[in-house]
Image (cartoon, coloured by chain):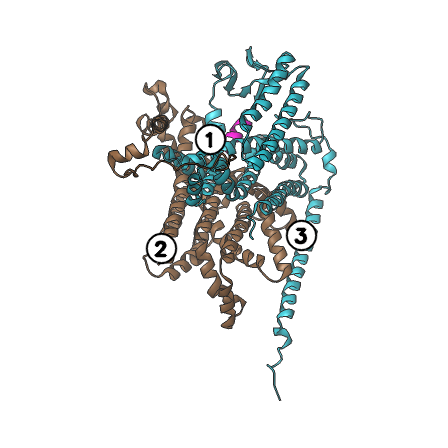
Chain colours: A cyan, B brown
Amino acid sequence: MVSGPPPVPWHHDPKFRALFHQVVLVALLLWLGYQFALNARANLAAQGITSGFGFLDNTAGFGVNQSLIPYSESDTYGRVFFVGLLNTLLVAALGIALATLLGFVIGIARLSPNWLFARLAGGYVELVRNLPLLFQILFWYLAVLGTLPGPRQSISIWGAIFLNNRGLIVPAPVVKTGAGYVLAALVVGALAAVALGWRSKRRQERSGQQLPVLWSGLALIIGLPLIAAWAAGWPIGFARPELRGFNFVGGIRLIPELVALLLALSLYTAAFIAEIVRAGIAAIPRGQMEAALALGLPRSLTLRLVVVPQALRVIVPPLTNQYLNLTKNSSLAIAIGYPDLFAVFAGTTLNQTGQAIEIIGITMAVYLSMSLLTSVLMNWYNAHIAVAER
Amino acid sequence: MPASYPSYVRRSLTEPKPPPVATQGGLTFIRARLFDTPLNGALTILTGAMVALLVWPAVKFLLIDAVWEGGSRIDCLPQTIGREVGACWPFIKAKLPQLMYGFYPEAERWRVDLTYALGAVLLIPLLIPRLPYKSANAVLFFGLFPFVGFFLLVGGTFGLPQVETRNWGGLLITLVISFTGIICSLPLGIVLALGRRSSLPIIRTLSIAFIEIWRGVPLITVLFFATYMLPFFLPGSWKIDSLLRVLVGVALFAAAYMAEVVRGGLQAIPRGQFEAAMALGLGYWRMTALVILPQALRLVIPGIVNSFISLFKDTSLVLIVSIFDLLGQLRAAFADPTWATPVTLFTGFAFAGMIYFLGSFGMSRYALSMERRLNRAEAR
């Protein structure tokens, strides 16, 4: 007679234990949630706050010093939300563009064979990465922009861009009738360039001969709109800002809060991007570059066809993370009064209405959905560019 | 040879390269690394000019033109001393108590100093790898020190008068938040990371949700959540200290980031380690504590220190919810009209910047040296 192992008592059965632990956890969380809800109801009643999203239709009654959509004090809190959201997106988009540009330049500079140049880039990265971002925002806002002279003593760059304590004034684009032709020419030029590139690729696959794609493409994209603009009598121009009395007229004024936030965010994020770029390029084995050079590819083609595509695979995921960080960090705008989503909604609106639960919930949900959207896109991109293992 | 040879393929051998030049030592180094081609030489000169343009004014401002003695703004005005004025160090001297302790009563500041001294005495031997008794030291630092520090700083017992946390400020707040964040986030992060890799679906889902929600929102929303939203969810009779609320927010936020760092380490442990531990008859907890975590945590020491560095820098955000840390006190000091001079702002930022820089840079250099040490052990 074969005797198996002694039967496991029911309270040692792994299946039972797993179920038991999870049920206990869920019960605990449900109880906690119920208590929270009870407390919230009692506290809201005690403070006389009606919960719900009805407050979004109430009149805000406060001004916002920068708005991309028409806004006045008599508009609703719901509109304030969109004003703030657009301001957040504006600073994030500008910041991402600047940080990427600067980050790539500094990251490549760190790999320069020139000792001094590489050290300067390294010093920048160390200095900027080790100071808190809020410190840098306050530094630019209070110490640098706050001590600038008034409009009459503006710092001027080529007589077109002016910097003073009221912000940065840049020329504004002026569009007259006929600008549509230039835009159309641009579209036609771009399409033609794409078609040319496609033909050149076909031809190279067939015969090995290449067409001068880069130059003819550039000529198409830049030349055609230029000809169109000349034919239409230069319908697109720039209006120079001019000092009239105590202020500037013409041109676009970026408020000092935006300039300070933009400077701090892009300089800070650029240091992180530089490290990512440096690590990405350094991750490519030397053999790859040597093999390409041995095949006879010139340096520019080696970079374009061998180094960059492989480096991008390493660089892009952490890079998008930095973009997301920049967007989230733009919420520090509240410290200097730039009217981003957080400042006008979780700041002023919360102060005026006291609807803490709804407002912080909505604000968190906005940032959270940006994060989740980015990570979904990132996963898709990663799957798309992953090395095809055979 | 086919007529249509791809244009990028060589048809002849390349010229042999000259022998590599020496790149070490004095003049040779300068020639090889700075002036090897005309273009590089021009770049060197340009960069050198840029460095000089950045460094010289900084040195001039901080040291050469600086004012070292004085009692008020008058001593830091160019009209009074008749020359260009650099940093106004008397301003820092006058504001130092606020920048260090906030409004902690003057008679009780020895308690803060004693806490710092205790912390330093326990921390420094912990950081030097050569010294013995590491586990006893760690227990004292992470287990006992927080309680001693709590009773010393808060008071109210053992004959010490109580000091309300709203009187705390300056570097004290910065260090208290960083330290609490660090010692709470590591164990919480480990638990969350284990939960994320658990085989129990509900625990796994909840861990993932917790981690992703905290990581998906900016820290400032978490601080607002802790300051304005949390009180609604707690019984109205509970009066929770505002510093404590922020500490909870920071700790949860840091724990979510720490969890991802620890998860990286857990994922790097080969399956065989788990299987071997199970084959030895170890249960889940003993397997995790004795086999997996010691290896996983060692792998991610650089990541852990990086989280600590961001935590240290992020503590500055509490000034937005009206808790006056180093940066908050600095901002308050700027508003003092008795010290309003054109150089006050730059002086203050230079001083606070040095403190923040030394803290973060020191931590990152220490992590680097630890990493090298561990790699050396691996390479054997």
Q: Which residues are magenta?
A: A258-264
Three-letter code for the amino acid on which mark 2 is drawn: Arg
Dot 3 lies on which element?
helix
Q: Residue visible at 63% across and 30% down? A: A195
Dot 2 lies on which element?
helix
> Which residue is the extreme one toward the top?
A245
Label 3 crowding class (10 Å Cα cut-off): few <14, some 14-19, many 20+? some
Q: Chain of mark 1?
A: A
Three-letter code for the amino acid on which mark 1 is drawn: Phe
Label 2 crowding class (10 Å Cα cut-off): few <14, some 14-19, many 20+? few
Q: Of B182 and A369, which appears nearest the observer? A: A369
Q: Are marks 3 and 1 in contact (CB under 8 Å)?
A: no
Q: Are marks 3 and 1 on the same chain?
A: yes
Question: Would residue B161 be visible to someone looking at this image?
Answer: no
Question: Would residue A313 be visible to someone looking at this image?
Answer: yes
Which residue lies under the disc numbered 2?
B376
Q: Are marks 2 and 1 in contact (CB under 8 Å)?
A: no
Three-letter code for the amino acid on which mark 3 is drawn: Phe
> Which residue is the extreme one toward the left?
B26
The picture places residue B132, in percent across and down from the top left corner, at: 33, 60
Which residue lies under the disc numbered 3?
A36
The dominant secondary structure in magenta is helix
Instruction: Quarter of the image for the C terminus of chain B: give it.
Output: bottom left
Which residue lies under the disc numbered 1?
A139
Give the Cα separation between the discs numbered 3 and 2.
Answer: 52 Å
Label 1 crowding class (10 Å Cα cut-off): few <14, some 14-19, many 20+? many
Q: Give above or below for A259 relative to B170.
A: above
